[in-house]
Image (cartoon, grey):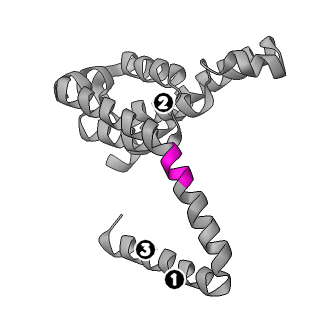
Amino acid sequence: MSDLSTYLLYAFALAWFFFSLARDRKKTEQALRRAWRSFLGILPPFAFLILLLSLVVVFLPQEAIARFLGEKSGFLGYFIASIVGAVTLIPGFVALPMAKLLLEHGAGVAQMAVFISTLMMVGVVTAPLEARYFRFRATLWRNLLAYFYSFLVGYAVWMAFFLVRR
């Protein structure tokens, strides 16, 4: 995003904030309190994961990230990204900055697409809870289909970037 569009988004948000404040001050203050509580609830896991990722980036050389998750890592890179995504339980607002940081340190775009897809769609950690409500067989099929679909997403992203580079 360019600097201009960032400033425009901030100006837009600020304008709506003042509009809301002028319209109903009490509801706006309630919304701000709720947002603050939500932020405080999100902050600890977010800070922990950013710290963890920072340690990984510091201690893992860029060459290692590129070797295991880079463009030339082949199927192994897709597989590693898919397994990590499938067993990790982190929200998207943490996963996307994490993927961006890994991209900046040598990870491949398609591998990160597989990582984000499996992270969002495959729930290894949440499968027991899901199975209680939807039965084991339905949970298994949903997770398997989502897992394989993630590879299609990675392939589609790879094709899109391959065509753009030509």
Dot 2 lies on which element? Answer: helix
Q: Residues within 10 Å of mark 3 (few under 14, many from 20)?
A: few
Q: Report whether residue 107 is seen.
A: no
Left or right of 68 on screen, residue 149: right
Dot 2 amino acid type = Val
Dot 3 lies on which element? Answer: helix
The residue wearing badge 3 is: 10
The residue wearing badge 1 is: 15
Dot 1 amino acid type = Ala
Q: Report whether residue 69 is seen.
A: yes
Disc 1 from disc 2: Cα separation: 38 Å
> Most prominent secondary structure in the magenta stretch?
helix
Q: Residues within 10 Å of mark 1 (few under 14, many from 20)?
A: few
Residue 87, given in percent of the width and then of the height, sits at 52, 19
Q: Residues within 10 Å of mark 2 (few under 14, many from 20)?
A: many
Residue found at the far bottom of this picture? 22
The residue wearing badge 2 is: 114
Q: Are marks 1 and 3 in contact (CB under 8 Å)?
A: no
The dot on residue 126 is none
Q: Which residues are magenta?
A: 37-41
